[in-house]
Image: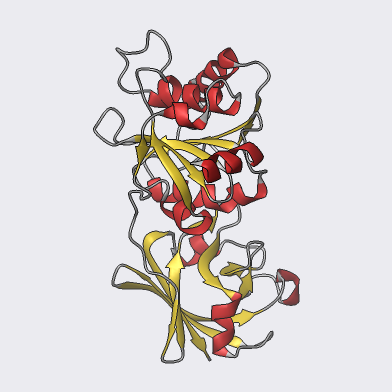
Amino acid sequence: MLVLLTYLNSHGQNQMLVFQSDFGLKDGAVSAMKGVAMGVSPDLKLFDITHEIPAYNIWEASYRLVQTASYWPAGTVFVSVCDPGVGTERKSVVLLTKSGHYFVTPDNGTLTLIAEQLGIREIREIDEVKNRRQQSNESYTFHGRDVYAFTGAKLASKTITYAQVGPKLPNQVVSIPYQKPSFENGKVSGTIPILDIQYGNVWTDIDKKLFNQLAIKIGDDISVQVFNNKTEVYNGTVKYVNTFGEVREGDDVGYFNSLLYFSLGVNMANFSEKYKVYSGNTWRIILSKK
């Protein structure tokens, strides 16, 4: 306990509250969450990751959190609401990572990648008697507003301590299964967790250390296979480059994205649309030297 208290004193909440959801911005749902937060404390600093998570896509919510969180200061509180099981028995939790970040969310798979990559220091279940917006008990379908935004705001503003969130839980979360990246028989395999959605580039979870086992150099061709479950969707060749400008417009490339994971793209075009390659925990990729 003394170790945790010392840790919290140096990684305490910093008034920053960061939201993501699958709500979109066509109605007032996001604004309502932020209004609740400001009602707790007008001194909070509110930010967004995205509210364009595809509806019910818990896997993408998990990835967008881990894509972003490490760039924020320790003590930042994240509220993530992609909650197709709203109102059911899934737990509402706050995860404190070993990096000092807080995540307020349903424990429905959203924390899969955060738990793996940032580590679990402690998890607490939200006490919805104490940490729920007043006069909201008859609402069963908007916990993002009534529970998560409210609790996140109380935590970020230091209105409550982390211990006051609710009872401590075992250090484990609901996880979405996916193929971990690996090297075997001269081939590297991985998952396509997400798309670079604006441009249609295909991002994998294959890092440079693993990729380098293929002994492929810049300018070489790479053989690529993509599967959705067991169905082969793409089988082709791309050129390994540092940046798109090294090839002609319309050429297919393999490169390392800003997070330093192997990716597929087309110079000035959309790889995902061109080849009908998409993302999620069921999408696999296999690379080999041409």
> Residue at 29% of width from left, 35% of height from top?
85
Image position of 201 with respect to 64: above or below? below
Colour mapping used in the image: secondary structure
> Residue at 30% of width from left, 67% of height from top?
229
Front residue of this view, candidates 47 and 247: 47
Q: How many marks?
A: 0
Q: Residue furthest front?
A: 2
Asked if residue 194 shows in the view, the reply is yes
Front residue of this view, candidates 128 and 50: 128
Q: Position of residue 262 (x, y in %)?
A: 57, 71
> Residue at 36% of width from left, 22% of height from top?
128
Viewed as shown, does residue 119 lie left or right of 136?
right
Viewed as shown, does residue 205 lie left or right of 226?
right
> Residue at 53% of width from left, 39% of height from top?
102
Q: Position of residue 212 (x, y in %)?
A: 59, 84
Q: Residue furthest top?
A: 135
Q: Position of residue 196 (x, y in %)?
A: 57, 56
Viewed as shown, does residue 43 lie left or right of 86?
right
Q: Position of residue 219 (x, y in %)?
A: 68, 86
Image position of 288 with respect to 53: above or below? below
Asked if residue 54 shows in the view, the reply is no
Image position of 26 with respect to 272: above or below? above
